[in-house]
Image: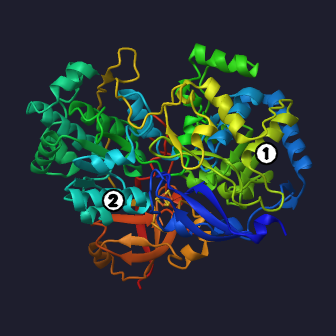
Amino acid sequence: ASMREERIEKTKTVCTYCGVGCTFNVWTKDRKILKVEPQQDSPANGISTCVKGKFGWDYVNSDERLTKPLIRRGDHFEETDWDEAISYIAKRFTAIKHQHGSDALGFISSSKATNEESYLMQKLARQVIGTNNIDNCSRYCQSPATKGLFRTVGHGGDSGSIDDIAEADLVITIGSNTAESHPVLASRIKRSHKLFGQKLFVFDLRKHEMAERADRFIQPKSGTDLVWLSAVTKYIIDQGWENRAFLYKWVNDFEAYKKSLDKFTLEFAEKTTGLSAKTMKEIAKEIASVDKVAICWAMGVTQHQLGSDTSTAISNLLLVTGNYMRNGTGAYPLRGHNNVQGCSDFGSMPNFFPGYEKVSDNDARKRYEDAWNVKIPGEPGKDNHQMIHAIHEGNLHGLYVIGEDTGIVDSNINYVTDAFKKLDLFIVQDLFLTKTAEYADVVLPAVPSLEKEGTFTSTERRIQRLYQALDPVGDSKPDWQILMEIAKELGYDWGYTHPSEIMDESAKLAPMFAGVNYDLLTGYQSLQWPVAADGTDTPLLYTDGFPFEDKKAILYPLDFNLEYETNEEYDLHVNNGRLLEHFHEGNMTYKSEGITRKTPNSFIEVSPELAKERGIEEGAKVKLISEAGYATGIVHITDRVNGKELYLPLNDNGKSAVNYLTDNSVDKDTNTPAYKEIAVRMQVLKKK
Ligand code: SF4
């Protein structure tokens, strides 16, 4: 027996669930996970974790793990070896590239993979294949937040750290079920609220735990946050409560922006949002009268047709009131996956190189071209959503997906899986034979975070190292090694022997990561980007201005002319989100016994009023029908939802997935699916 089998090993790792970025020692003996032990010096969490971080690890030992590459022969998969799998992929890539050009291939990177792996996936796309058709799942969640911040303050990340949220005088959360989706961060807010008099305003459709704790719980109509945000901002300016010194020194375009607010009167906002003018005035007064405001938001804001504009409205409000540049203030889009921030940061984006330099920026492009000795297109590639359309239109023939169950998590999954069937080459790399993998031509067995090294970047832009705790199962391999083998077969021998070398290359090329290296990330040390060449990091952004030429932020004018009404035929609105115990499509949590025992089944939340109207009782079975498809589920009657609002957890073990109901509508600026805008009708299958 090896040493590893004989004694208990304690290995530092980073949680692989949400974006809070909790770190801890995982205790293992052989392959057994004995314990998860957070440390005093865990930067984000200290000695806490939530149930997922503590108990959500059994999936690594699931007997459903893929242990060998699979290759499709007719209508079934056969196990094969790496040599055959890699050479098949390289041949097919080459053939498609010759026949249809580089842009006939697409790449979807994983927010569960490490930063180094995201870097290599975009390097494979850009250097080896010659396309910018690369994206990641931030397209499904937080791209609109990033867009809103780019437009106004210039960095697509949280303005400060979790400590800053804890320090604010007033925390506002919008469309965020923080206690269940970002539990450890929520507990910091709860603590500040309870012990230090921090005020908490919660804007949401559903009365969840944070709503119950909040000083004010406010329920605007679905999809109308932009309107109350703009009306409150206008009211603040009308009253002369804006932060004039800040605006004068640090912000451009105030007058033009002020004019653009004309439309957002309290009367218009009352009509659109359903909130009273009195409520909006009180909110405005409260925001203007405290010193430090931090706003946190999540999918309830971004997964709408106006997700980017609403995120922009949040940033506008913070600018008008001077709530940037200081500790305890700022904008906090709460990142969902452990590494969704890092996956975008390290270049798995159709329009950006690592560190958010545009592919159209000639200087940046030349730097990569020189380093990689190729030409790279200066036009942005296709995002996830455009890739699926392009397959339907016959313009995309090969797709390589790492660690993403696209066939479940993208919207309108019937449309998405129909696209998969049309592909000439479909490669899926994952831990399990997911729903998406069932459509693949080749399935490559990857490893979870505990079986590899690398770094993740959390919601507070914090880059943290994970160390290898277990050996890979069977023939499975880390994504970075698989990517290297594919590149090599295609004639590009990258020759990395350790992920640290990938980070070194990235640090050399991307100014945002100039000073990042593994020595500075040893153990529980971490760095928050941007990191200067001398290794100085940035816990709080914008302290000496905004990253624009004149260092001034931009107030970005907005409009609102959408109607989100249910209609006679589809008379109910479905909201959706996470449960504390489960994570997304559930590929990991449903394979963790400690968790499934607690929450085995999904449900549909129905308000007491609606249950009465439809004559249904707790446990009834219903079918929800939208224009795109249908889903069935068991009814749970609760006053967490109101009237004609339904709530469907999105973690449902693939049974009644929300995405059978969603359609192709998207945020107009980023193509993020409008997951939160589903109108359905309900058919009762069993009354109780
Ligand atoms: Fe993991 Fe998020 Fe829970 Fe922390 S709060 S343990 S990062 S799921």
- Front residue of this view, candidates 620 and 651: 651
Classify 10 Å Cα crowding around label 2: few (below 14), some (14-19), many (20 and above). Answer: few
- Front residue of this view, candidates 612 and 223: 223
Label annotation for residue 33 = none
Picture residue at 83% right of the left edge, 62% below the top: 474
Q: Position of residue 229 (x, y in %)?
A: 24, 41
Answer left or right for 527 relative to 166: right
Answer left or right for 585 relative to 246: right
Q: Quadrant of residue 237?
A: top left
Look at the numbered disc 1 and give the secondary structure of its residue. Answer: helix
Q: Quadrant of residue 683?
A: bottom left
Q: Position of residue 9 (x, y in %)?
A: 68, 64
Q: Position of residue 178 (x, y in %)?
A: 37, 57
Q: Position of residue 451 (x, y in %)?
A: 71, 56
- Label 2 vs label 1, nearer the camera: 1
User: Does residue 668 appear in this view?
Assistant: no
- State which tag comes first along the sequence, 2 or 1: 1
| Distance Cα–Cα, label 2 vs label 1 | 52 Å
Q: Quadrant of residue 518?
A: top right
Label annotation for residue 482 = 1
Image quadrant containing the C terminus = bottom left
Image quadrant containing the N terminus = bottom right
Amino acid type of the residue tagged 2 in the rendering: Glu
Answer left or right for 563 relative to 406: left
Tell me which colouring the rendered structure shows: rainbow
Picture residue at 76% right of the left edge, 19% below the top: 373
Look at the numbered disc 2 and give the secondary structure of its residue. Answer: loop
User: Does residue 112 appear in this view?
Assistant: yes
Q: Tell me the residue that label 2 is attached to.
A: 568
Amino acid type of the residue tagged 1 in the rendering: Ile
